[in-house]
Amino acid sequence: MARPDRSPPIFVSLLVAAALASLVPSFYGAAVGDFDNARVFFYCGLLFAIAATFIGIAVATTPRNRTEHRYLLGLVLSYFWLPAVLALPMVQATDDLRLIDIYFDMASALTTTGAPIFAPAQLADTVHLWRATVGWFGGLLIWITALAVLAPLNLGGFEVSSDARPGTQGASLRGQLATVTAAGRLRRAAALLIPIYMGLTLVLALALTIVGERPLFAVMHAMSTLSTSGISAVRGPQDGAAGLTGEVLIALFFVFALTRRSFSNGFSADWLGVMSRDRELRLAIFVAIVLPSFLFMRHWLAAFEGNDLDDLGGAFAALWGAFFTVLSFLTTTGFVSDSWAQARSWSGLPTPGLILAGLVIMGGGVATTAGGLKLLRIYALYKHGAREIDRLIHPHSVAGAGRLGRRIRREGAFIAWVFFMLLLITVGAVTLALGMTGLDFEQALILALSAIATAGPLANVAGEAPISYMDLGDLAKFILVAAMIIGRMETLVFIAVLNPTFWRT
């Protein structure tokens, strides 16, 4: 049993984080002369800080056994109540927006879904910065909790390579975990990851500014890239001033959504060597090369039929537009390249929405800000399938790859398949629920995939026509909020929390 500690509960820590986050739009508003909104965010942040202080004092004298299980339950509940708290500044800063729409937007940002419910012109720049900050904070939150809470419990994708059942601690970790409380692990993870997360965001923002992007857009796009929220004050990098260079910079930083090894152990001298051996990154590179090549061949064949082979600029635009957009949706960010539209115009082919939907379902790396099934689970299913095919040819063969490789091919593939089935069942249930609100099948399916994969911009590009979140009914919005939270925390986590055995371990 974990030792009692007097550290503040998770909801107090989140209130403190909300208070600090509100200073970002407050300072920006004061700097650009938007004093009304600056005061709103400053006073709301002060209110959050006062509330956190009084609640922290009230519970400080009550020691509790705050195990990973309790922190996990607190985190799940936080995704329901925290958006209501974060919506308070937006309610005060805007006059003509409905509360349900603001709550939906904050839940979308906190889960890094980034569903664009408001038109860019509806909100002031200060409010747009608040939305991006909430999304950025949501990405940091999942970084910290994945390392400090989900990893010890073998959830969130860690169960694929672990020798313990999901929701329990492995035998090799029990001795180590007994010496450090769950709160201590959260503090250590925060101390390790916050400087890295902030540093990477600052580097990308400065780089985008240097290549010509407006400073506000540079900061927002940097926040959205690291958190994979895809939130922007415009349509994304395609409407920015950085152009192709800006997209290249953003594409380089997508690596932090493809594998946790890119940041979890810092940046050592052997960083490139570690990255080159990472299973998830190699799978992502394979997808990012094969799919754009396939799309490019479709474009090339269409151009061949139209006798437009001399347009090399259009050919390059088609290749880059496909590569950037594929990589963006694979990380569930949802940015669309400015060359994506040019590629479609060059080839005369429609948007391959089904491919983009498949990419967001695949998702990024384990313990990253990306959503979806996660690449490690895809890798486990692939290795299991390859091994079964090999056994058809050589029934008595003995596979190598060591203990970890065998674990991933066998038990890891089994739990990955279970999670895949749970994901499909969840998508089906959400699609059915949305269909009962009056949406047709295509719209309901696209919205369900967007919410569960935490890739809100998918709704704008996957179908024949963009789907407006604002035009949805209130019931559909509540269903999507629940789906976003399930997609962010994953179905397996909810099953573990509701399992009585989970609380007896």
Image (tube, rainbow, N blue to C red):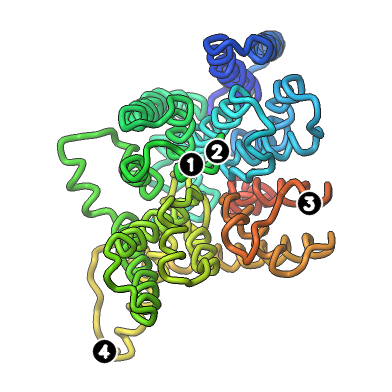
- Report which quarter residue 376 is drawn in: bottom left
Residue 60 visible in the displayed image: no
Report which residue position mark 4 lands on.
Answer: 394
Residue 234 is tagged as 2
Q: What is the crowding at mark 1: few (fewer than 14 residues within 10 Å), some, or many (at least 20)?
A: some
**Does label 4 or label 2 sit earlier along the sequence?**
2
Question: Could you tell me which residue is drawn at 41 percent across and 46 percent down?
Answer: 257
Place of residue 492 in the rendered image (x, y in percent of width and height, measured from the top left): 59, 55
Contact between labelled residues 2 and 1, with CB atoms less than 8 Å apart: yes
Pick the quarter of the image with the N terminus.
Answer: top right
242 in relation to 418, above or below: above
Using the numbered discs, state the Cα–Cα distance from disc 1 to disc 3 in whole angstroms. 26 Å
In this picture, residue 374 sits left or right of residue 482: left
Which amino acid lies under the numbered mark 1 shown in the image of this protein? Answer: Asp
Report which residue position mark 1 lands on.
Answer: 239
209 in relation to 331, above or below: above
Secondary structure under the numbered disc 2 in the rendered image: loop
Using the numbered discs, state the Cα–Cα distance from disc 4 to disc 1 in whole angstroms. 55 Å
Q: What is the crowding at mark 3: few (fewer than 14 residues within 10 Å), some, or many (at least 20)?
A: some
164 in relation to 135, above or below: below
**Does label 4 or label 1 sit earlier along the sequence?**
1
Place of residue 493 in the rendered image (x, y in percent of width and height, measured from the top left): 60, 50
